[in-house]
Amino acid sequence: MNYFLHLGIYACIYSIVAMSLNLAVGYCGLLTLAHAGYFAIGAYTYALVSVKLGWGFLPAVGLGMAIASVASLAVSMSAWRFKGDFFVMLSLAVQSLLFSLFYNWFKADADFGTWANLTNGPFGIAGIPKPNIFGLQFQTIGSIALLAAVLAIACGAICWLLVSSPWGRLLKAMRDDELVARGLGKNTRFVKMQVMAIACAMAALAGAIYAGYVSYIDPSAATLNESILFVCMILVGGVGNFKGPLVGAVLLIALPEVLRFVAIPDAIAANVRLGIYGLCLVAIAHFRQQGIAGEYRIE
Amino acid sequence: MLQILANGIITGGIIAVMALAFTVVYLPTRIFYIALGGVYAIVPFLAWTGLQWGWAWYVAVAFALVIGVMLSLGCELLNHAWLEEKNASSGTHLVSSLGIYIIVVQAIAIIWGNETKVLRQGVDGVFNLAGVTLTQAQVGGAAIALLTIGSFYLWLQSTKLGLEFRALADNKNELALRGFSIQKLRLVAFGIAGLLSSIAALLVSWDVGFDPQGGLAALLLAVVASIIGGSQSFFGAVLGGILLGILRSQVVWFLSAQWSEAASFAILALFLVLRPQGLLGQKLRLESES
């Protein structure tokens, strides 16, 4: 049972990430590789304020989301001027800067969480407390699964309302022809800022749940490989509609579990899993460019 | 000071070879060729295996280069040529290339393991030139990089194939209308890219060692170099590579090695905002930009 709850929590976390990334990639056509950085911002903020200041879950998550949405300006301002390959490169630059920050804000002789050593560098932060809302402790795996599910459903509802609103139509119009959207008097720069702020804040929320569940966070959560995994997830599942990213997230969680039943030695299981993700990407590019359940083809 | 500069120029020369490899494919085909990182990652392992089998070093190197070029040609024949026939978007090319890169890297990790390996045995010989200390691997690397870049330009500027190649980079459709085979020239581009990246990979792994994950970082560095230098010309990639090498060695010296990655991307961001066409590029008309 615990095993399924564990998978459920991961499915919720990755669904939130996939839905947020879908807003940027599927509805704006902005293929960003910086998302793992924002995921880690949420995780680190939750870890630091809950360990050092003893904050509860909600204010800590709120702070993380606020920081992530301010930091999202780095991505959205690059989207003002660049599209396609150049935007991908700039988002990569943001990812690399965030990762360096988490990795390098470190001083061996200082206590972590202080100004000299904020993130504890490569050693990460351990012993992060489980979520705590108004004195209510989420200690058992079942209660955390419930919390994750509620938050995932809330995020799903927000996404649903956003993309089915006139604002969601504006996003699609901007994706398909930005010049026309601007010609109709829409402020596309401001819209890009809004989308990125929402998407990055949701990624930060997922990061906070992750940190609260695993109780440990280190810079490897912000690496490029992590970003590639997120992008892989939504490209396989498909973007541009509501169900695509959910299919992708669940599929990429379920796939390695199925592999457990095939006799693959443990030493290479992780490599086989990543190799299958790569195979999925090639197959998607050749046979179904909109993904399994998606609507929009990446340009 | 001179020492840091010399180190930077030598690293930059090798980055320049890799940047050239990326540009050779990107300019004519507009394919963001991430799988080149896979070629870069697998070649040192092949050479290492050859050495383990007791081959002479030149046989092992030739074997690795041939397989590297064949892998790169395979990417074109089995993947990009198909996609091009279906008129796929550049995003699709990028995604499929990323997929191939992931497959290659994981295959390497399964076959050879994840550890860092070195190609040379023992301590390297040292040269001392006017107060600058250089290892044998550095001097050899610089010489080979220079030779590679030089012969590429000679080929590009003075042979008929080189002329056709420049024409392909300039205007693909008109070249096709005049009866030249685009498919053949694309194969040449992928072959050269594979060869250049294999050479860069062997030079780096001779100097500092190699592991399966290093390909993407090297490729991204090459992309940054080609954007800095000006992504519309073959020469810009070399200039950008050397500049980037110098900059990185300064950062390693004055800050720390961990910041060099971030510094290169910060420079990229600076260039994209202030001078998106790069050092040697010209501003294009809006409709001819892509």
Image (spheres, rainbow, N blue to C red):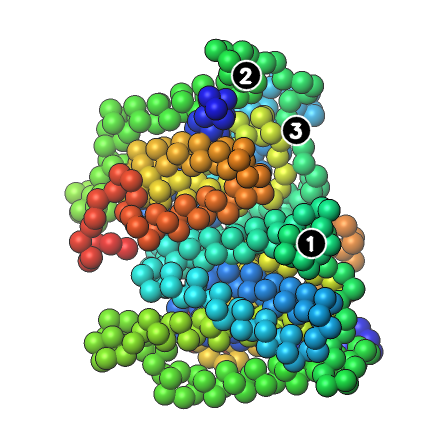
Q: Please state, as top left, top right, bottom left or bottom right, where the C terminus of chain B lies in the image.
A: bottom left
Question: A136 or B97: which is nearer to us?
Answer: A136
Question: The residue tagged with tag 3: helix, strand or loop?
Answer: loop
User: Closer to the camera, B184 or A195?
Assistant: A195
Which label sits in the foreground, 1 or 2?
A: 1
Q: Is residue B157 left or right of residue B263?
A: left
Q: Dot 2 lies on which element?
A: strand
Mark 3 or mark 2, earlier in chain: 3
- The residue that mark 2 highlights is B133
Q: Residue sitting at 68 percent across and 69 percent down?
A: A49
Q: Residue A297, percent across and down?
A: 40, 69
Q: Which residue is mark 3?
A: B118
Q: Is residue A168 visible?
A: yes
Tell me if mark 1 has few (under 14), some (14-19) or many (20+) residues whose alpha carbon lies within 10 angstroms of its own: many
* Position of A194 relative to A82 (above/below): below
Find the distance from the CA under tag 3 to the CA under tag 2.
21 Å
Check disc 3 and give the amino acid type.
Val
Q: Amino acid at mark 1?
A: Asn
Whether callout 1 and callout 3 share a subunit is answered: no
Q: Position of residue B114 (x, y in %)?
A: 69, 42
The answer to which of B163 and B285 lies nearer the viewer is B285
**Is label 1 in a helix, a strand or a loop?**
loop
| Front tag of 1 and 3 | 1
The disc placed on residue A120 is 1
In the picture, measured across the screen, residue B209 lies left or right of residue B167, that is right
